[in-house]
Image (cartoon, grey):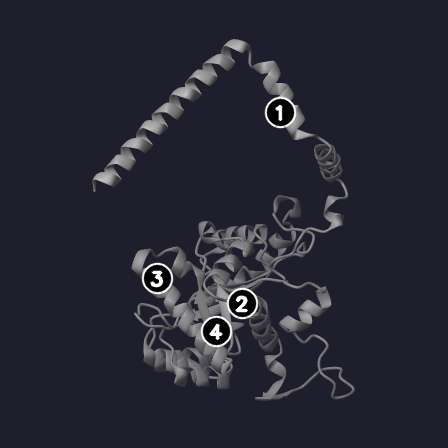
Amino acid sequence: MRFYDMNIRGKNYQNDLALIKEAYKFGWDYLNLNYSADYYKEALSYYDDLVEDILAFDKNETYRNKYNDDSIAISMGINIQNANSNEIQKIARRNRDKAFVISALGGDLKVNRSVCENIKMDILSRPYYKRRDSGMNHVLAKEAARNNVAIELCFADVLHNHLKYRANLVSSFKEILMFHRKFKFPLILTTDSRSIYDIRSTRDITSFFKSIGFTDREIYNGFYYYPKEIVDLNNNRKNIIVQGVTVIEGADDFTESKTKTPTYEEFLEMNQKESIFNQSLDEDDFEDLSLVDDFDDFDDGFDNIDIDDEFDEDISDEFDEDMADDFEEGLSEDLDSLDYENNVYEEDILWD
């Protein structure tokens, strides 16, 4: 499985490169760097430099395993913040052909509804922002599903909050998950990392979301299927005539595209594994290790030991006669004390 993070806070060239390198080290495969609408054009100026630096990353300095040794890919998008409904629509209309991904920070119910009803928007980020509820209801859930607007849950919100605020966030996550299961709108999971200290490994992130009730399928969809669908849609946006009608270059029939993102069931069938998050080590992982054979030899020898006989021989050699006498004397004193306590307890019962 490949892991996509659609919300990394872009700032400048040096900071972005450090974030990408740290995320690559911890197993992420795709990052979308978000900027303000004003800074987006300047960020595009050093995009090619970032791609060149990524190719120079040393895989030996990472924690990536043999199932996940590909290079990391990046994109740049616009994240709209502190804007009302009209401003969001104007920014989305103005930058739709320029920006790869357009998202907006939620929180206000009017903003949440405006984003969910706008087909030009890709993501509604954190609809629960500065709210005591989730910021979602059945009306917004239906609109998000109809316009294919993804709802984003950020791990950083849980990471940087504590006590009742964290509990409130987890409750909002569960409520949004409930709407997702009923109305089937796209639900993506992100880190919203601003510095290298916010980056967590993919295993840590998946473990957290599993602990609050997400299934393997929902984690797969949140980190790969839905983000990959957003990326593929925007890569092919220029070929979309109207909604539901797309020009496929080089196609000689009406068959489906071969680059379709596999569903969770298709992924399991291709990999022939019960779960993508509970993979056990196979025999190939121990080809260069002699530890397994040594442990088997040790285990066989341990089964042939008569523990009782060995223990008796050690006791007879270690204890001499004086120690044995002291042991018997101390044991007799303990028994006498126990008998006295039992007699006193019985007398108390009879007296009562």
Dot 3 lies on which element?
helix
**Tag 2: amino acid:** Thr
Please say if 293 is above or below 98.
above
Q: How many numbered marks have been drawn onto this rendered protein structure? A: 4
Q: Measure the C-alpha gap from mark 1 to mark 4.
A: 73 Å
Say whether disc 1 or disc 4 marks the residue closer to the N-terminus.
4
Residue ID at (75%, 35%): 297
**Tag 1: amino acid:** Phe
Say whether disc 2 or disc 1 marks the residue closer to the N-terminus.
2
Q: Which of marks 1 and 3 is in front?
A: 1
The residue labelled by disc 1 is 311
Residue 71's spot in the image, x, y percent?
65, 56
How would you rate the neighbour count of disc 4 (Cα within 10 Å): few for under 14, some for 14-19, many for 20 or more? Answer: many
The residue labelled by disc 2 is 215
The residue labelled by disc 3 is 167
Residue 338's spot in the image, x, y percent?
36, 28
Residue 159's spot in the image, x, y percent?
40, 56
Mark carried by residue 159: none
Dot 2 lies on which element?
loop
- Horizontal side of residue 9 vs 30, given as left or right: left
Residue 208 vs residue 106, the one in the foreground: 208
Say whether disc 2 or disc 4 marks the residue closer to the N-terminus.
4
Residue ID at (43%, 85%): 117
Residue ID at (60%, 88%): 244
How would you rate the neighbour count of disc 1 (Cα within 10 Å): few for under 14, some for 14-19, many for 20 or more? Answer: few
- Horizontal side of residue 44 vs 329, given as left or right: right
The residue labelled by disc 4 is 102
Q: Measure the C-alpha gap from mark 1 to mark 3.
A: 54 Å
Q: In which quarter of the image is residue 158?
A: bottom left
Say whether disc 2 or disc 3 marks the residue closer to the N-terminus.
3
